[in-house]
Image: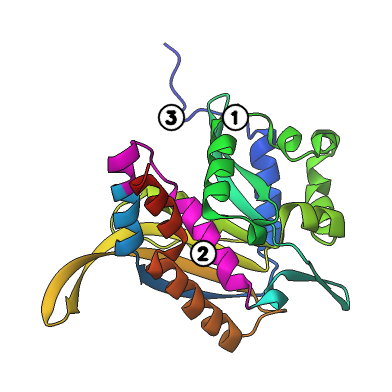
Amino acid sequence: MKKSRGYRVAPFGRHRQLVAASVAVNRETNTIQLLTEVDISRPRHLIAEYRDRTGERLSLTAYVVACLARALDDFPQFNAFHQGRRLILFDDLTISILFERDLKGELVPEVVGLPAVNRKTYRQIHDELRAIQQRPSQPLDSATGIAWMRFIPGCLLRTLIRLAARNINLRQRFGVVAVTAVGMFGSGPMWLLPLTGATVTVAVGAIAKRPVLIEGCWQEREHLCLTLTFDHDIIDGAPAARFTSQFAAHLASGDELDNVVDTAAYT
């Protein structure tokens, strides 16, 4: 009888090599992070109300993206990256969204750039995200238009990713602002600390229920756990804190959903 070695060997696929190289390069970014919670009871109520009326589930990720775009309207200097001694500031806001894809049984992240979100309504952002979620999975390099990277030796991947991070066209296509919402798959209080090369990254964690004293009465409210990461080469702590407060106010208000829900009420 052949004795078992107590382990098995599996290939470290090309997709994982790309992810590992990206993470290694992102670790070199000088970042600061802010962890916070936002009471999203009102937007969650509006989403539930809309589903009861129409049967459609509205995207919370799209809501986060829409609120992020509105907050960035007052901080245009955040929509930028530095290229050597130059600061490149973009006119339109592209936000990259991280999706989890199943590629032949291997779960890998795919980054998709959502263009011109500063000129789109919540409904438009929602519809675009739903269309992306429903499209068939494809290799990461094909999905991002860099299929030629599959022919690059693994030892050169980090160098190419560093060069891509300084390329204006690629930055314009995928944006310098990112949202990852994989933390919503968890339960209870949960924050993510992403390794990111974006100028601003919003990592959406889980939803936690908290008791809140409102007009003398304790109420259970839903709070969204958030981690905001900033490129410290471009953004200092004080403007990062001011931006986070404004972003949180947009999230808590539910204003981006009002038109959608009101429309459903009269149809």
> Residue 61: x, y in percent?
48, 52
Residue 85 vertical position relative to residue 21 in the rendered view, above or below: below
Q: Which residue is mark 1?
A: 135
Farthest residue to the right: give it: 85
Residue 67: image tag: 2
Residue 168 vertical position relative to residue 234 in the rendered view, above or below: above
> Residue 48: x, y in percent?
30, 48
Foreground residue among 145 and 251? 251
Q: Which residue is mark 3?
A: 6
Farthest residue to the left: give it: 217
Circle 1 sits in a helix, a strand or a loop, which is it? loop
CB within 8 Å, label 2 to label 3:
no
Residue 189 seen in render? no
Circle 2 sits in a helix, a strand or a loop, which is it? helix
Q: Is residue 220 left or right of residue 113?
A: left
State the separation of the CA atoms marked 1 and 3: 40 Å
